[in-house]
Amino acid sequence: MGFEIGSIWRRWDPHIHTPGSILSDNFVGGWEPYLAVIEGQSEVQAIGITDYMSIANYRAMRKFRAEGRISNVRLMFPNIEFRITPKTRDGRAINIHLLVSPDDPSHEEEIDNALGRLSIEFNNRIYSCQHAQLTALGKAIKPDISHEAALREGVNQFKIEFDAFKTWLKDEGWLRRNSVVAIAAGSNDGASGIQHDDGFRALREELYRFSDMIFSGKPADREYWLGKSHDGQAVNVYGSAKPCIHGSDAHDLAKLFKPDHNRFCWIKADLTFEGFRQAIYEPEDRVWIGEEPPTLHDRSRTLAAVKLANGDWFKTLTYSLNPGLVAIIGQKGMGKSAINDLVAYAAGSWQEADKDSFIDRARPHIKGMSVCLVWGDGRETIVNVAAKGAASDKQEVRYLSQKFVERLCADHAANGELTKEIEAVIFAYLDPTETLNASNFQDLREKRTSGVIAEQRRLQEDLRRLHREISDLYSRKLSLPERLAKEASLRKEREGVVSQIPPATTDEEVRVAAELQIERDALAKLIDLVGTQREALLRLGRLAEKVAAFQSEIDRFWNGIAPELKALGIPEEHWNAFLPSFQGDISAPVDQRKAEMQASIATMEGDVASPNHGTLHFHQAKVQQLSALTTADEAKRTRILELQGRIATIDTELRRTRNEIETIEGAENEQLASLREQRRSTYYSYFDTLDKERKILAELYEPLQRHLSLGEQQERHLDFAIRLNVDIDGWVEKGSRLFNQRKRLPYPTPDDMAAAANEHLKPAWTSGSHSELKEGLDKFLSPYGEAGTTVGDYLKPSQTVSDFFDWLYSTDHIGLTYGLSYNGTPLENLSPGTKGIVLLILYLAMDQKDTRPLLIDQPEENLDNESIYSLLASYFRKAKLRRQILLITHNPNLVVNTDAEQVIVAHCVKENGGLPSFSYFAGALEDCKELHSTRQQVCRILEGGAAAFQKRERRYSLDG
């Protein structure tokens, strides 16, 4: 066993005739020009030598080959053509072929003996299928013809009934085991010539069911026999798909190796008859009819070979690699992982974090070793293994080492590294015109959601502002009882002061006292009015400051969008349309209103020297004047003035307190209710933005979701969904820190609070429904009084009610995450083995835009054989058509039933110095001739290898 590249596309012609053909021998010049044409070409490497009911010409060709001729043809086998009945609609017998393996050294003798036991009866005499007997048959029919003509006549008359032919082949054990049955599909001399409506439908179906292959080069026939047309009739009726093969059917030199329409026969196999037989098991992937073979792999992204040099552990060799699926097998410790590790290292895809990798463990002994990757386009990547670290980060291959897969499948990676891998696949499915020049999914996601994220941040800031405003108003509302008590106290105090005023003793004192009270009341009213106006002046100043700040925001907004408007090509004359409606200078109306208010204050105050009637200074002067006339008794007057001054002060405080009470109970109470409603509305709006974000993200993964819905069964079991991720525990932990645990709390423990949050809030958070959010918040807050009015009673001294509502209405514990489920179970709840299946489906079936070589190390871990066979084998078969796969495995199903094109067998021998010496051998699965053939190695090394081969044969109904 050497190092063979395995199954690759080669051109075959399984149907050519030779000089001396019994029928239609049109080869002018005999053997020499015939052999010269074969030797003068290099395209066809395997030929089937066709003759009628004989191998005489095949035997002649073998003799030429033994003499050193046609050495450019690496495989030659006999194709024996028979004519069987019933006849077609054109009156011709049906052509059926036996293509026989030449591997048995005695195959010629075995074939001759079998043909000698195939016979027909004519005129009460039995004639067998041998030249002498066929000639005798021809003479019996036409006595006067020559010997050569008699042989042709005998062959022409030797037509076997199908049932007899079938019985004969079944009885000829050696021949059936070593041959492939191929039937012509044409309507002239093929089974298609038997019509359905002429009573032979069952026979026609049996003919096709009996055949292993179909001789036809028509594309429509290929589609039919692969089960891709007519609703899969070929598979449903005949039990399995069948390969269509084609040959030139050459009867002259001009036709040799030149089938009609250049419908050449390409077979992906080792150049052995067993390789040819593999087409039965893989009819679609192993055979192609066309001018060129399928070129599905990007040569610049396919490894043609690996060269290892200067390594004590490895022989200096070039290991050629098949462009399809390369399975690397061997016992434990034989150096299987070394290949993938070294390839990944040279390709810049080795993961330094994998401390148990071959490179990490063997680095001291392979330092300085040269690894050369030869790519399919001739490019070479050469690196030397360094003392430490990775060679580069080019990422020219995708490497799924065991450690990498284990890390992705770990619980903590469900929403981390694995999510990033999923996002990378989503990004690859997007049309390039939809990626907005983003380099990855995260970048694209940020671009697509930047507007809604900005809106979310604005809403969060609005919530914090509303909390502060509500807290201020609520604090004032909490002071209402204190203000009412103060008002009652002031009224009682006023009554006490009034009771102390000495009574008037004369009519004049009564008059003066009454006038003085009137003037004091008028003065107090003007003082209130002037105070109100001065407060309005202050508010006007604050308003001007707010407007100035807003104007600065507008300027910043404008400075931000102006470059974008220019870059997007919007003419400057239209730019004003993008400005907010508020614009212009507010100084004039502010100054005007300020002047009006100052004039009003001046009018109310009046001139100090000569105040007008009804002004503040006028009433002050009158109060002063009347105060001097209250009584003639100086002591009494002093006492009255003192008490009246106290009454005036109390009245001023009473009016201020009453105004505050009325403001709190009226305007501020309405404002508080409005702000609370705004807070709820803003909170609800945040969930609306989450829905907008979800819709944007749904658009991003829709192409991949569509692919899943049209994929194989396992892909349809996968479902992508964007879920609202709610961290209840983190939210409760933050909230619990606010409360005074020494008090009897509505939710005594964090668990109680979490239970209430899960019952009332989580369903609302998840749905985002405004009505559910309102109901959930009300129920959660109900133990703290209506709208949480008593929450302050339970907080720590260092915490405020605003802190509580900041926490209650926080949103940092709520976010969108990608949810991947398999059979309805979320990714994070899957077992490690099932996560591994999901991961492999991700790379094998969904990651279709990535055509780099895929290196996988033992994906069968934690999976049973049946799971591998039923779940993964088909994905490997499909993935290898578009990207090269280097698969390290111990499982025969991942070698045999994926139809690996090349199998590399790793061996290791311990040298005298104690260091291992690794060597590798390779071949195709169909290599089974020698004791140490590839197939024997698979069956020996991989437990259950023989069973895997049998399972594949059962899949194609070939076990009987």
Image (cartoon, rainbow, N blue to C red):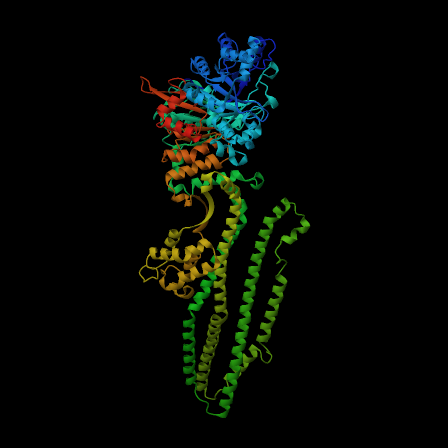
Q: Which quadrant does the N terminus fall into?
A: top left
Q: Nearer the viewer, residue 240 or 723?
A: 240
Task: Kindly give the residue lying farthest to the top in the view shown.
Answer: 67
Q: Residue furthest right?
A: 573
Tell me, yes or no, if residue 911 can be seen here.
yes
| Left or right of 661 on screen, residue 545 | right
Residue at 38% x, 24% y is 938
Determine which quarter of the picture holds residue 350. Answer: top left
- Asked if residue 307 can be seen in this view, the reply is no
Q: Give residue 732's position: percent from left, percent from top.
A: 38, 54
Query: Between residues 580 and 349, which one lies in front from this camera angle?
Result: 349
The quadrant in which residue 250 appears is: top right
Residue in view at x 60 percent, y 79 percent = 612
Q: Quadrant of residue 863?
A: top left
Q: Quadrant of the C terminus?
A: top left
Above or below 275: residue 504: below
**Residue 434: x %, y % from top left:** 57, 41
Relative to the observer, which residue lies in front, 204 or 488? 204
Q: Choose between 59 and 190: the one closer to the eye.
A: 190
Q: Position of residue 289 (x, y in %)?
A: 55, 25
Horizontal side of residue 105 vs 525, given as left or right: left
103 w.r.t. 688: above or below? above
